[in-house]
């Protein structure tokens, strides 16, 4: 893969992912007309006006277009000309789909052929890489590798393993592992052949490894006598140190040994010579503090393996074991010149074997039990150990074991602590065994353990590598690399990547690819509904601290640092091979550094022994290898793995992820299994998985055990050992699924690579992934004998079953190869590995650029076994007819343009690769009808003559636009209307049994529609009453009415005027005051005072409009005041004075409108408006008001409870500069009569509009309503909508309007009606909620990982985002409490509407109830309900509420055509998901990010992260600003539309990831029938996304007018 475009993609990734992070539930959402008003837009025509029909790229050239279409088509963001996707492609035969659109089986009329575009849907085939592409050669190599191995005559759905491996097995081809090993060997061979200049200039450690290798290969100064002399010297050294006679040598002497003597024997054996004698002691990093080292003492290590002591083995093996003991002691005795007594030697050797047998059979813990590390964290002081295990003197033992410290070990005393592992064995049983055994037995066991160990280490090391031992130069090099890995790594780097710049490129490229893997994993935990929150937090923290190591440690290429590392290694050029070996041995024991070596150093000396089955050489750490280290929480990708055939920057990503990714993922998942999970992010022993979560995991793991135990290829009782292999099998599953998710995450933002050339040209990206995965395990066939042997001893399943078992649990394979259900590789019933895979795969965050070495392959690789037939018989592919392709064969494999010889036709299976087409749903299947509806909808709208690559919008929408087809929004609206119409037509029995609030809403609707008891006089009398009520409350004359009287008004009078206007009647006069949840404590309520709300919108005061509109504005003020005066029975007002005063009010309003209105973008920064003030403080800062009086008046509906208000009360002042300073100064400098008239106008206007119109009375709506700011604010609220629907246009739909008002003002009784009508059955209600919640979980699953991709977001910011996601509230369909009569009645207990109330009284009671409920929480604390839906549920809508951190999916959206449980998932995610995702992402934008997980104002995005986001957002601004379809200067306003554009991107990408996550574990749905049968899942997704913008014209897809030009379609 070329990574040139990755950086650019990451910019959009960051934008999309940040804003889409709260889109965790978009997969089952869509927006209503309200939301559509916010998100929907039609694209601009590419090159023609809306009246011109888009020209098909296949049709004859159209007439010359009008001059208005002269501009070029919309260019891509790079401004490069669009490239014809079919240009320069190889001349290949197109595979055409059958006519699935045809509804009958009659043959097509030959004189009227079906248009090919109708059949293929005009969708081009995938692009094949071109020769001019710099990656062509590497793509060709991959294609050739497949061609060598694959047997495409095999059905991939029935035997995928042999489909991938069969041909190569027969021909003995080199596997990827073989190829990689050869490349590694070549680099290693070359790195030792440096010229002398290199060695002269090399740092000392590099020279030292060269000296070692050379002396290993050839050292004439080292003879066999030297070796024997040194061994004798070391044996004598041991005897002198322990000061204890050897019973073997003096069998007839009495032998006594106390605890001190035994401790010296065992201690010096370990400390000086590395022999684990009785106690297995070593130094390693501490369990709970990994930055310190601790001494560990483990269970005794027996001489021989456990199996030799089995009841059916030991009698036959005993003589051999005793002979081995005797032989070793005899060899030592000869070297020391001691003569042995044969009988005594035999007897004592038998005693040692019996002693060892006891240790082997009683003191070896079950390895599965040992995986629970915490049980072995048992610290003891040495003084305590002297009591617990008195057969040792522990201070003496430890000082002896640390003898190489050169005297420093003397500081050890009884206060020192050691970690005792398997304490029941190490302390109790061993101590008792020593106590009851003969002293010589335990002492002899010590010698045997020592010499048995040394036979493979010290003795082997000191052997001269002379020719008869078969050790060659290459082996000496391997030994050198194992013993001195960092000088060897320096050599490897210098040889393989000599250029410093190339080294940096490799590290950068690999790290960047790794980011895509990180991106795919964090979200997986959200899918684990059985893992509790605390466990998930622990996992997230561990991921946050993951250490990534790429290629090589930087310090090994620094001469000074490398030399400093080995400063204590004193090897010189003059040292003999023997001396070098001994110096290295001593160096290792002193330096004991477990962080550097993953295996005990002594085992590396196996290289010096002849290779046998028992001493096969392990793989080198420095070669093709990758590993996770749980005690470091690190993932390491050494340079040896980052090469072909597993990695090249020019390889297709699908092959890297399918092979390298899946195998490396296997190994990495072990770091998060039951053992690895015990370590935290810093490598400390700190289990974060709760017991309940672990139990759930274990329960699901049993499925894997049972599944693999059913694989029995030869005989019913010869099966894979599912229990023994469960860990490896789960890791296999984790590896492939994790790698696949990473690949899909990358492709979702970058697209897939072009197809391979030649043989591999027909394979899709998904197919390449699975082909590479299977090819990794290609090996020679395994006969029954080897199969049985492997199942007994190996913890890995045979290779064939590693492929079969893994793929059959992964439905993404079924999607990729279009396999039918219930083949061996696609069984309907299989283990649901969601939980298993995600738990174990969580640390597989970097698998996409890894592969395992021979060490890892030794861990994970196994040869295959045939499924059901002996290896001598080839797979019986002809036993049944192979699956035939559903389309004509494709000749893309042909490498020349010459026609195929007709007498030697190409096998169709070679052309189609024997891969069937996707399954089409069949008539009679449960979901067929719903699939058909979707297919028909596409057929109604799509114009497949349009090229989708050049004009996708008209490809999807063109036909429907021409034919005025019903859009999805219109269909949904009609369905909503049907339910709403029906729910009001309940029979009387329903209404009689309904709870009171449901009855009340019905009374309201009935009286709204028809109420003969309510007359015009009633309306006038009530309006007069309310006007008089207000005048009585304020006790201030109205200057409008008394223009010739001097008017004086103090702060108290003004405060009453404004306060009662708001409190009693809801008019925002001067101060915009309301009660809402607190900013920092959302469970309490606060009073907010905002900037003044003007009468008219700011646009009417623009310089070019105000002179024209001023007269109308003044007239509107005068008209309202005149009406109020008439209602009050006032005499005719003085026209001149009225006009002047009205003009003054307009001028006053103009100042407010033009100087006290904050920029909406600035207002998005909510924290700047969190300004609490006491009322006493406000009396000083804004002295034109008496704030206690104002607040009491504003809370008048509390019925006396407002009297508790005093100067200590706090309110939140928003826009302080305007609300306090500017407004206060304006009032101070304005005539009091003008200020009073302004407030009186506001109050009178509200009162006049509050009383609804009676029947047959035209509404009192002013023509200036369109200019009124308050009208814009409240036109959809109670105040405006409660007008009686009686004008001619309204009468036609009067009842419908009344119903809509009822649903608005009483949303919960209306919701109860909607639920009862839409889902009358409680069982169906639960099923809907459960189904939607399950889909929502898949959306949650796809989102958390996205944050990990944001390298510009710091750790603290990510933590805040994760916490917010953890606290997300999910609301589905309806609040449960609305279906409970008691709870619904209790909610509306203060609403006193009766059946006898007329319409006017009901309206006024609702007004009072609404305002009272707003302020009541100030004195009657009410717990906040984060499950609040906030709206009637019968709407096609969905919303995110940042101050609740909730996502709500009302019932109205969870219906066709946006949701049905029987719809294809791709259409749900592509339509409902993408549009809803748009709106949801706004909850995580610059405003929403200021609120935390419980809705408190608590910004978690750091300033640096926010700056980075803003910088990247500029790319989107620039991109959209380049869209200029008509004229170069008529472009989309990228700056103004950036928020919506980013949300559009976030919605579709988030939904797509959710779909892919679901399909990867559940498989894709079958294809649509009829017209849509040729569309795959991905195509359906994008078709549905585009179709949701479809309507009847280019710019007419919006049902509602836009008031702001923040959407792309409104800027042209």
Image (spheres, rainbow, N blue to C red):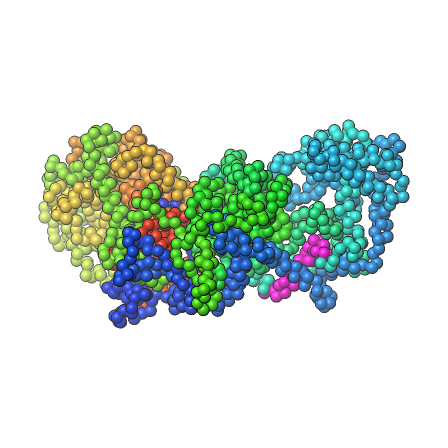
In the image, residue 899 above or below residue 1074: below
- Residue in the picture at 70% in, 43% down: 283
- The answer to whether any part of residue 648 appears in the image is yes
Viewer-side residue, 592 vs 582? 582
| Residue at the (64%, 50%) spot, across then down | 855
Q: Report the quarter where the C terminus lies.
A: bottom left
Image location of residue 134, percent across then percent down:
51, 67
Q: As displayed, is residue 936 above or below residue 946?
A: above
Q: Position of residue 1469 (x, y in %)?
A: 37, 49
Q: Is residue 565 visible?
A: no
Where residue 540 sits: x, y (%)?
Answer: 51, 45
Residue occupying the point 77% across, 51% down: 461
Query: Residue 480: within the magenta?
Result: yes
Q: Considering only vertical position in the picture, is 1435 above or below 352?
A: below
State which region is magenta. 475-501
Q: Nearer the viewer, residue 1044 or 281?
A: 281
- 5, 216: nearer the viewer: 216
């Amino acid at each position: 893969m070329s990574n040139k475009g990755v950086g650019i993609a990451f910019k959009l990734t960051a934008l999309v992912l940040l804003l889409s992070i709260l889109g965790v539930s978009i997969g089952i959402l869509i927006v209503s007309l309200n939301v559509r008003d916010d998100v929907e837009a039609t694209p601009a025509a590419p090159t023609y006006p809306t009246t011109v029909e888009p020209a098909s790229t296949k049709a004859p050239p159209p007439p010359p277009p009008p001059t208005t279409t002269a501009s070029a088509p919309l260019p891509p963001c790079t401004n490069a000309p669009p490239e014809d996707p079919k240009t320069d492609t190889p001349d290949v035969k197109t595979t055409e789909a059958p006519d699935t659109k045809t509804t009958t089986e009659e043959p097509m009329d030959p004189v009227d052929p079906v248009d090919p575009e109708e059949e293929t849907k005009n969708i081009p085939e995938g692009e094949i890489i071109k020769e001019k592409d710099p990656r062509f050669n590497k793509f060709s190599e991959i294609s050739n590798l497949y061609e060598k191995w694959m047997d495409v005559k095999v059905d991939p759905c029935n035997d995928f393993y042999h489909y991938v491996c069969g041909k190569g097995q027969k021909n003995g081809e080199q596997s990827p592992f073989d190829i990689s090993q050869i490349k590694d060997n070549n680099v290693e061979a070359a790195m030792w052949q440096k010229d002398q200049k290199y060695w002269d200039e090399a740092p000392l450690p590099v020279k030292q490894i060269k000296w070692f290798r050379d002396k290993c290969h050839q050292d004439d100064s080292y003879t066999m006598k030297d070796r024997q002399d040194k061994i004798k010297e070391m044996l004598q050294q041991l005897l002198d140190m322990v000061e204890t006679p050897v019973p073997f040598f003096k069998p007839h002497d009495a032998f006594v040994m106390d605890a001190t003597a035994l401790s010296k024997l065992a201690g010096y054996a370990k400390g000086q010579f590395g022999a684990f004698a009785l106690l297995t002691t070593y130094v390693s990093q501490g369990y709970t503090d990994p930055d310190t080292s601790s001494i560990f003492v483990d269970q005794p290590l027996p001489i021989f393996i456990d199996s030799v002591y089995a009841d059916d083995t030991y009698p036959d093996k005993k003589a051999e074991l005793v002979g081995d003991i005797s032989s070793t002691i005899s060899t030592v005795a000869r070297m020391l010149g001691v003569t042995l007594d044969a009988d005594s030697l035999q007897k004592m050797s038998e005693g040692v074997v019996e002693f060892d047998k006891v240790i082997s059979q009683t003191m070896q813990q079950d390895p599965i039990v040992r995986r629970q590390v915490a049980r072995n964290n048992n610290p003891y002081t040495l003084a305590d150990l002297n009591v617990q295990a008195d057969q040792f003197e522990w201070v003496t033992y430890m000082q002896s074991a640390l003898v190489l410290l050169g005297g420093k070990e003397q500081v050890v005393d009884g206060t020192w602590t050691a970690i005792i592992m398997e304490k029941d064995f190490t302390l109790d049983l061993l101590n008792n065994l020593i106590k009851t055994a003969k002293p010589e037995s335990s002492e002899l066991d010590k010698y045997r353990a020592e010499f048995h160990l040394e036979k493979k280490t010290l003795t082997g090391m000191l052997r001269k590598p002379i020719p008869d031992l078969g050790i060659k130069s290459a082996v000496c090099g391997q030994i050198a690399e194992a013993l001195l890995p960092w000088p060897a790594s320096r050599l490897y780097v210098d040889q393989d990547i000599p250029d410093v710049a190339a080294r940096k490129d490799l590290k950068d490229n690999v790290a960047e690819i790794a980011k895509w893997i990180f991106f795919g994993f964090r979200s997986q935990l959200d899918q684990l509904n059985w893992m509790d929150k605390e466990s998930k937090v622990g996992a997230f923290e561990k991921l946050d601290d993951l250490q990534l190591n790429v290629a090589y440690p930087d310090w090994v290429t620094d001469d000074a640092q490398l030399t400093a590392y080995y400063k204590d290694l004193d090897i010189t050029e003059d040292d003999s091979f023997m001396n070098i070996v001994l110096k290295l041995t001593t160096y290792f024991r002193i330096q004991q550094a477990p962080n550097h070596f993953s295996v005990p150093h002594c085992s590396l000396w196996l290289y010096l022994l002849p290779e046998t089955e028992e001493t096969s050489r392990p793989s080198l750490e420095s070669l093709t290898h990758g590993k996770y280290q749980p005690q470091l929480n690190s993932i390491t990708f050494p340079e040896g793995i980052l090469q072909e055939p597993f990695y090249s920057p020019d390889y297709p990503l699908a092959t890297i992820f399918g092979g390298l990714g899946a195998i490396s993922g296997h190994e990495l998942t072990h770091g998060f299994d039951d053992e690895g999970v015990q370590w935290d992010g810093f490598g400390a022993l700190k289990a974060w998985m709760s017991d309940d979560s672990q139990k759930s995991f274990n329960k699901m793991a049993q499925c894997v055990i049972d599944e693999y135990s059913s694989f029995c290829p030869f005989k019913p009782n010869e099966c894979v050992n599912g229990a023994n292999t469960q860990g490896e099998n789960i890791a296999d599953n984790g590896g492939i699924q994790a790698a696949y998710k990473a690949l899909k995450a990358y492709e979702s933002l970058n697209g897939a690579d072009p197809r391979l050339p030649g043989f591999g040209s027909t394979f899709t990206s998904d197919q390449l992934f699975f082909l590479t995965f299977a090819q990794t395990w290609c090996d020679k066939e395994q006969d029954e004998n080897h199969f049985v042997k492997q199942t007994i001893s190996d913890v890995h399943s045979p290779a064939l079953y590693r492929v079969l078992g893994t793929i059959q649990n992964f439905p993404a394979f079924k999607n990729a190869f279009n396999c039918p259900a219930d083949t061996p590789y696609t069984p309907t019933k299989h283990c649901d590995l969601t939980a298993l895979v995600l738990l174990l795969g969580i640390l597989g965050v970097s698998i996409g650029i890894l592969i395992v070495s021979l060490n890892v392959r030794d861990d994970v690789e196994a040869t295959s076994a045939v499924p059901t037939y002996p290896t001598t018989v080839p797979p019986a592919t002809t036993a049944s007819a192979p699956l035939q392709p559903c389309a004509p064969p494709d000749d893309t494999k042909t490498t020349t343009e010459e026609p195929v010889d007709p007498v030697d036709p190409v096998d169709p299976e070679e052309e189609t690769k024997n891969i069937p087409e996707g399954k089409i749903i069949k008539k009679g299947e449960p979901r067929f009808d719903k699939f058909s509806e979707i297919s028909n909808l596409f057929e109604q709208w799509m114009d497949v003559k349009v090229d989708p690559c050049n004009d996708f919008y008209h490809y999807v929408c063109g036909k429907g636009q021409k034919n005025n087809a019903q859009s999805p929004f219109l269909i949904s609206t009609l369905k909503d209307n049907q339910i709403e119409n029906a729910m009001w037509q309940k029979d009387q029995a329903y209404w009689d049994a309904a709870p009171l609030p449901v009855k009340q809403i019905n009374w309201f609707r009935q009286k709204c529609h028809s109420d003969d008891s309510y007359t015009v006089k009633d309306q006038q009398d009530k309006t007069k009453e309310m006007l008089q009520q207000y005048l009585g409350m304020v006790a201030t004359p109205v200057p409008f009415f008394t223009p010739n009287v001097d008017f004086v008004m103090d702060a108290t009078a003004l405060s009453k005027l404004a306060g009662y206007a708001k409190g009693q009647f809801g008019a925002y006069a001067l101060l915009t005051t309301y009660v809402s949840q607190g900013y920092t404590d959302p469970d309490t309520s606060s009073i907010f005072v905002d900037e003044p709300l003007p009468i008219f919108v700011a646009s009417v005061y623009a310089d070019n409009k105000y002179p024209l509109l001023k007269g109308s504005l003044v007239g509107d003020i005068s008209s309202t005041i005149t009406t109020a005066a008439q209602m009050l029975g006032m005499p005719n007002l003085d026209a001149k004075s009225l006009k002047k005063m009205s003009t003054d009010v307009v001028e006053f309003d103009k100042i407010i409108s033009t100087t006290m209105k904050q920029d909406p973008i600035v207002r998005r920064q909510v924290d700047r408006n969190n300004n609490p003030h006491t009322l006493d403080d406000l009396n000083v800062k804004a002295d034109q008001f008496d704030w206690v009086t104002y607040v009491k008046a504003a809370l008048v509906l509390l019925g006396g409870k407002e009297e508790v208000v005093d100067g200590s009360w706090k309110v939140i002042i928003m826009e302080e500069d305007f609300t306090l300073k500017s407004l206060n100064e304006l009032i101070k400098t304005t005539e009091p009569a003008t200020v009073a008239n302004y407030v009186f106008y506001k109050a009178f206007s509200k009162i006049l509009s509050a009383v609804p119109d009676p029947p047959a009375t035209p509404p009192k709506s002013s023509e200036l309503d369109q200019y009124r700011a308050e009208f814009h604010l409240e036109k959809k609220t109670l105040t405006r909508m409660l007008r009686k629907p009686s004008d001619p246009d309204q009468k036609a739909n009067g009842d419908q309007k009344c119903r809509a008002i009822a649903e608005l003002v009483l949303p919960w009784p209306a919701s109860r009606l909607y639920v009862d009508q839409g889902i009358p059955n409680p069982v169906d209600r639960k099923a809907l909620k459960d189904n939607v919640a399950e889909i929502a979980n898949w959306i949650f699953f796809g989102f958390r990982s996205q944050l990990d991709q944001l390298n510009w977001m710091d750790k603290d910011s990510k933590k805040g985002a994760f916490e917010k996601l953890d606290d997300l509230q999910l609301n589905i369909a309806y609040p449960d409490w609305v279906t409970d009569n008691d709870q619904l009645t209790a909610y509306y207990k203060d609403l006193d509407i009766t059946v006898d109330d007329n319409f006017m009284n009901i309206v006024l009671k609702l007004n009072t109830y609404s305002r009272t409920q707003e302020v009541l929480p100030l004195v009657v604390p009410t717990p906040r309900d984060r499950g609040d839906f906030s709206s009637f549920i019968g709407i096609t809508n969905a919303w995110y509420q940042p101050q609740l951190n909730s996502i709500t999916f009302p019932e109205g959206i969870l219906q066709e055509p946006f949701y049905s449980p029987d719809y294809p998932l791709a259409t749900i995610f592509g339509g409902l998901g993408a549009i809803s995702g748009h709106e949801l992402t706004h909850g995580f934008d610059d405003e929403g990010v200021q609120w935390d997980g419980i809705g408190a104002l608590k910004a978690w995005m750091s300033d640096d992260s926010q700056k980075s986001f803003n910088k990247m957002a500029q790319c989107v601004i620039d991109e959209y600003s380049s869209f200029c379809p008509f004229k170069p200067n008529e472009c989309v306003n990228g700056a103004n539309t950036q928020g919506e554009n980013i949300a559009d991107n976030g919605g579709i990408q988030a939904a797509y990831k959710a779909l892919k996550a679901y399909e990867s574990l559940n498989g894709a749905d079958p294809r649509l029938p009829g017209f849509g049968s040729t569309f795959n899942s991905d195509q359906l997704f994008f078709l549905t996304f585009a179709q949701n913008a479809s309507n009847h014209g280019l710019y007419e897809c919006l049902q509602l007018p836009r008031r702001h030009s923040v959407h792309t379609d409104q800027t042209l």
